[in-house]
Image (cartoon, helix red, strand yellow):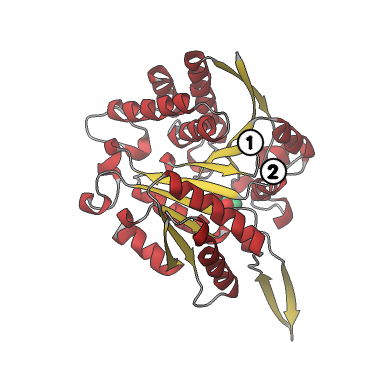
């Protein structure tokens, strides 16, 4: 029987509770589709700081590198706010992305038909089956550029640098073109080329590469306009490709279109087969342990893992269908609907597992 080794980084806040539900759903999918998964837990973020002093222990990197893929919850919380900036939980997340070379972050923003009423946008704006894929560059740009602080004439300053090389842009843009080829053949590249030099290089690179993908229709938007278009007419988008920081911001915005940030999954891929899969939301320390957490984004991230890294597309489809069915029977607190019971995190996980 096919067997997979999965590294599990539960992280902080609601991380452990949502990841446990995704693990249960994966296990059920394995029983049904004939594979086994062995989970190996490792520490990341605040939990790692508490246990080892640092947010990303070497052992965690080693475990993730040896695994077929990694499942991650979320990191961070007020408990670690007083950590120096180089030792914050978020540094662990950025560090594991860099250590595994996860340059391509896929963030699908799609709306389950059951959740149309949960979207803050009017039904005629979201249309019938809104399905946008944001492809975010994840290991470059201002997140990893040179930064520092200094003082000029007694006035303190700080700076961060946005820097992209042509190969860095090419590899993420090619991933986005390939995704567009598998979807609706439309790619929108988002930048700030009216102001930023790095954006001008980004745009030139997209223009040069498009000759290799004649079946994909390419457009460019400035990021401010894209932010507006996402709520004005989101149906116009198929695949959006953008830099690390713009992708961070636009994917949070796009997530709300789908009703709740608690629904959105993500895949972070390198040039190899293994990836890292995590919900796009954070650790929500305010609701940790209350049962209010929504495990569906993590469960959907596990489905993406089956599809993109483990070659189990039927199991991935089954999990996504189970989530859809679960939404027609019950809800978590963030997506309540009249007439449907509100389930705590664990019970929602069990419901999805029972429907796989
Ligand atoms: C995300 C998060 C992270 C990011 C933070 C926690 C560092 O917001 O995954 O979108 O900015 O990449
Ligand atoms: Mg973010």
Q: Position of residue 206 (x, y in %)?
A: 52, 63
Q: Is residue 170 visible?
A: yes
Say which label, 2 or 1, has the lower sequence index. Answer: 2
Spot occupied by residue 216 in the image (x, y as percentages of width and height): 42, 55
Q: Nearer the viewer, residue 92 or 343?
A: 92
Q: Secondary structure at mark 2?
A: loop
Q: Quadrant of residue 259?
A: top left
The image shows residue 45, relative to residue 242, as above or below, that is: above
Left or right relative to 286: residue 81? right
Q: Position of residue 265 (x, y in %)?
A: 47, 40
Residue 68, numbered label: none
Which residue occupies the foreground of this view, 218 or 255? 218
Secondary structure at numbered mark 1: loop
Tag 2–tag 1 contact (CB < 8 Å): yes
Q: Which mark is residue 274?
A: 1
Which residue is label 2 attached to? 100
Question: Which of the 4 quarters of the picture holds residue 231?
Answer: bottom left
Q: Is residue 14 left or right of residue 56?
A: left
- What is the quadrant of the C terminus in the image? top left
* Number of residue marks: 2
Name the side, left or right, on which 216 lies relative to 279: left
Residue in view at x 60 percent, y 39 percent: 276
- Whether label 2 lies within 8 Å of ligand 1 gets the answer no
Camera-near label (2 vs 1) is: 1
Q: Residue at x 27, y 50 (%)?
A: 126
Left or right of residue 154, residue 75 in this image: left
- Residue ID at (46%, 24%): 315
Residue nearest the observer in this picture, 42 or 141: 141
Q: Position of residue 246 (x, y in %)?
A: 51, 61
- In which quadrant is the N terminus drawn? top right
């Amino acid at each position: 029987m096919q067997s997979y080794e999965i590294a599990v980084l539960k992280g902080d806040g609601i991380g452990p509770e949502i990841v446990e539900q995704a693990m249960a759903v994966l296990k059920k999918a394995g029983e049904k589709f004939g594979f086994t998964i062995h989970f190996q837990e490792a520490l990341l973020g605040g939990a790692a700081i508490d246990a080892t002093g640092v947010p990303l222990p070497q052992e965690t990197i080693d475990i993730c590198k040896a695994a077929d893929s990694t499942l991650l919850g979320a990191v961070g919380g007020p408990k670690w706010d007083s950590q120096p900036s180089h030792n914050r939980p978020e540094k662990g997340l950025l560090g594991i992305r860099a250590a595994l070379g996860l340059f391509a972050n896929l963030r699908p923003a799609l709306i389950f038909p059951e959740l149309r009423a949960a979207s803050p946008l009017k039904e005629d704006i979201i249309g019938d089956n809104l399905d946008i894929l944001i492809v975010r560059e994840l290991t470059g740009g201002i997140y990893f550029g040179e930064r520092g602080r200094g003082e000029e004439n007694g006035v303190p300053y700080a700076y961060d640098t946005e820097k992209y090389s042509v190969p860095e842009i090419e590899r993420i843009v090619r991933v986005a073109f390939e995704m567009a080829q598998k979807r609706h053949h439309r790619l929108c590249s988002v930048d700030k080329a009216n102001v930023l030099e790095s954006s001008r290089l980004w745009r030139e690179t997209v223009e040069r590469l498009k000759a290799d993908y004649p079946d994909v229709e390419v457009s460019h938007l400035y990021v401010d306009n894209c932010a507006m278009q996402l709520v004005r007419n989101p149906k116009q988008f198929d695949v959006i490709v953008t830099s690390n920081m713009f992708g961070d911001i636009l994917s949070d915005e796009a997530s709300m279109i789908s009703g709740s940030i608690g629904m959105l999954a993500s895949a972070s891929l390198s040039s190899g087969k293994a990836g890292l899969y995590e919900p796009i939301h954070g650790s929500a320390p305010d609701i940790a342990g209350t049962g209010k957490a929504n495990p569906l984004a993590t469960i959907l991230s596990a489905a993406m893992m089956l599809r993109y890294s483990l070659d189990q597309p039927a199991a991935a489809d089954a999990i996504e269908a189970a989530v859809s069915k679960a939404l027609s029977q019950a809800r978590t607190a963030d997506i309540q609907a009249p007439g449907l019971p509100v389930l705590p995190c664990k019970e929602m996980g069990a419901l999805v597992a029972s429907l796989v």
